[in-house]
Amino acid sequence: MKSSPKLRPCLWDGLVVLLVVILAAACALAVWSRGNDAGELTAVVTVDGTEAERIPLKDLPDGERTYSGNGYTLRVLLSPEGIRVEEADCPTQDCVHTGTITRTGQSIVCLPARIIIRLEGGTVDADAPDLVIG
């Protein structure tokens, strides 16, 4: 019966380990450095999958905009503090019940009208929850 060979690390094994460590460090650096300079908070309005408007919220005077999609109309109130849907003629009224959005990543969705209002840019609050269910 033949005995199994003795396996020992060689120079190439060390180079592979070094390459994996360098790649892991580069990925970690790319993730941690992202998001520090995100710019100003901007509202992006999408109607039926196409971007309809991009509104910077900094120094925005209080105002009102109307958006229509798929036969429904939304009346949206804008202010430097946030955005909310004041009135909608859609049957579910989920967009109205969402309330005011004020932070990056928040959104208001009206499925019957196919309108999405989401906030982008700004700074991310480290103490904010990552996900809210229910």
Image: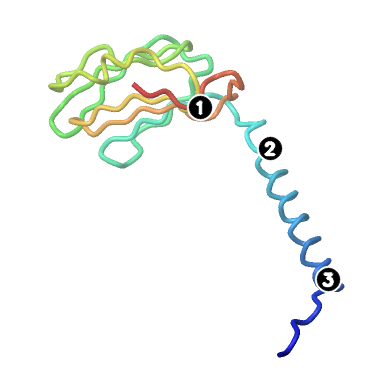
Q: Residue at x 44, y 14 (%)?
A: 82
Q: Which residue is mark 2?
A: 32
Query: Is label 2 in a helix, a strand or a loop?
Result: helix
Residue 4, compared with residue 128, is above or below; it is: below
Residue toward you, 49 or 13: 13
Name the quarter where the N terminus is drawn: bottom right
Q: Which residue is mark 1?
A: 130
Residue 87, compared with residue 67, is above or below; it is: above
Place of residue 130 in the rendered image (x, y in percent of width and height, measured from the top left): 50, 27
Lateral position of residue 36 relative to residue 51, left or right: right
Circle 1: residue type: Asp
Residue at the farthest right position = 11
**Residue 128 sits in which quadrant?**
top right
Q: Which residue is mark 3?
A: 9
Residue toward you, 2 or 79: 2
Residue toward you, 93 or 73: 93
Disc 1 to disc 3, C-alpha distance? 43 Å
Lateral position of residue 36 relative to residue 121, left or right: right
Q: Residue at x 67, y 31 (%)?
A: 36
Circle 2: residue type: Trp
Place of residue 71 in the rendered image (x, y in percent of width and height, measured from the top left): 13, 31
Disc 1 to disc 2, C-alpha distance? 16 Å
Query: Is label 1 in a helix, a strand or a loop?
Result: loop
Disc 2 to disc 3, C-alpha distance? 33 Å
Residue 108, compared with residue 63, is above or below; it is: below
Compare marks 2 and 3 and give the one earlier in the sequence.
3
